[in-house]
Image (tube, rainbow, N blue to C red):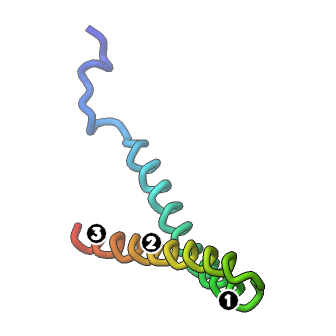
Amino acid sequence: MNETSNKTLTSEPDGHAITIFIIAYCEFAAIVLSLPLNCIIIFFSITKVPQSLARTYILNISVVTLFTVVYWILQDFVLRHLM
């Protein structure tokens, strides 16, 4: 029988956990960094966009995106403290 078949899953270093941590960190950083961008888009859509229909569309998309980002940040924060 092969030596590698007798090893348990815990005896080898877990590269998957490191990969998952890196992906989760990058996702959280992207969400946090998108907050100022959404606020800037909302500000410029109010002050710089001349057509009312375009301004309304940009504001709707920006506000929904901002609410989504805030929701995911709060959810991530709560889940980290529950675990």
> Label 3: which residue?
79
- Identify the residue at horizontal 66%, vertical 77% (top origin): 53
Q: Earlier in the sequence, mark 1 or mark 3?
A: 1
> Label 2: which residue?
68
Front one among 68 and 57: 57
Mark sitting on residue 59: none
Q: Position of residue 19 (x, y in %)?
A: 46, 48
Q: Earlier in the sequence, mark 2 or mark 1?
A: 1
Front one among 69 and 10: 69
- Identify the residue at horizontal 44%, vertical 78% (top origin): 70
When asked about the image quadrant of residue 55, the answer is bottom right
Mark 3 and mark 1 in contact (Cβ < 8 Å)? no
> Label 1: which residue?
46
- Identify the residue at horizontal 53%, vertical 61% (top origin): 26
Q: Position of residue 82 (x, y in %)?
A: 22, 71
- Using the image, determine if residue 66 lies above or below residue 83: below
Amino acid beneath label 3: Leu
Amino acid beneath label 1: Ile
- Using the image, determine if residue 81 lies above or below residue 11: below
Q: Nearer the viewer, mark 1 or mark 3?
A: 1
* Secondary element type, mark 3: helix
